[in-house]
Amino acid sequence: MALSSEEVERYARHIVLREIGGPGQQRLAKARVLVVGAGGLGSPLALYLAAAGVGTIGIVDDDVVSLSNLQRQVLHATDDVGVKKTASAVSALARVNPHVAVEAHDTRLDASNAMDLISSYDIVADGSDSFATRYLVADACVLARRPLVTASLGTFDATLTTIRAHEARPDGTPNPTWRCLFPEPPPPGTVPSCAEAGVLGALAGMMGSMMAIEVVREIVGFGQGLVGRLLVVDALDMRFETLTYEWDPENPVTGAAPTITDLSAHAKS
């Protein structure tokens, strides 16, 4: 896929990077990325993926824009209040980059559609704000053999990691899954929602941008990513820590005796 003269100019600052260059920019143009959630994390993520020239961006979200979203969900504007988030996303990303195709999935990701949706993309970036969705996406990515970049937000804290659980390390040890890191979701009601506890808006912007870096890095193939590493951010004290985690042979998806071989358990939850 040759870049047009307009695209060469648009992506000039990428093309001069030795780690990306023309071949890397072409890989971005061919890539298909599914963004789960057009909210606080998905907004900056999608904007930077579009600006970077990712060829096809899928947005899955069944919500509408509300006024309280606008403090952090920079994909949407005041005039978008009451509009479907997917429709707002299509419009906003077209303004950023007309060379990018945006596929809107105005639906809730669930056990009935997750495999089909995820299997039609090369890489998944999860910015959802629900534990049920996060575990569903993580399990589906393992089963569909798709890489996953996933982040979560607290009030002033956040985490980010990349999962390639369908692959192994050079020594043959499987890469870890999300469930190697967090085997089970917390009991309902134990972790307050964003609406209940609040969230620092700019933290969502920072983490969504870092998700975009991980996605671009995964597509092009440069640097050391976050596979087997969890980045932990404390915005109160502006501290960044990176924790390592390993494959757990007792994890229920890729362990020695897997108990999750499809998404039927998620259909019951």
Image (cartoon, helix red, strand yellow):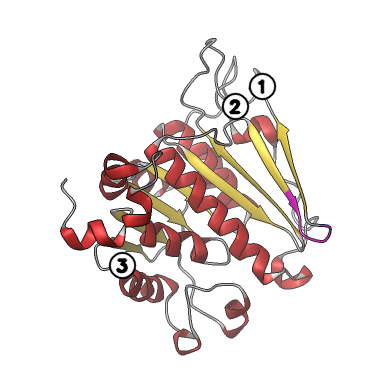
Q: Which residue is mark 1?
A: 248
Mark 1, Cα crowd under 10 Å, few <14 / some 14-19 / many 20+, is some
Mark 3, Cα crowd under 10 Å, few <14 / some 14-19 / many 20+, is some
Among all residues in the image, which is located at the extreme bottom? 79
Task: Please give left or right for residue 98 compared with residue 111 in the image.
Answer: left
Task: Please give left or right for residue 72 compared with residue 96 in the image.
Answer: right
Q: Amino acid at mark 1?
A: Asp
Q: Which residue is mark 3?
A: 97
Residue 193 point in image, percent of width and height = 72, 64
Residue 111 in view here: no
Residue 101 point in image, percent of width and height = 26, 61
Q: Is residue 144 above or below residue 170?
A: below
Which quarter of the figure has residue 22?
top left
The residue sitting at 49% across, 71% down in the picture is 63
Q: Which residues are magenta?
A: 233-237
Element at label 1? loop
Q: Earlier in the sequence, mark 1 or mark 2?
A: 2
* In this view, the mark in front (3 or 2): 3
Residue 67 point in image, percent of width and height = 58, 85
Residue 236 within the segment the image draws in magenta:
yes
* Label 3 to label 2: alpha-carbon separation: 35 Å
* Label 3 to label 1: alpha-carbon separation: 42 Å
The residue sitting at 50% across, 66% down in the picture is 43
Q: Amino acid at mark 3?
A: Asn
Q: Is there a contact, CB below 8 Å, between mark 1 and mark 2? A: yes
Q: Main secondary structure of the magenta part?
A: loop
Q: Which residue is mark 2?
A: 176
Q: Nearer the viewer, residue 73 or 191?
A: 73
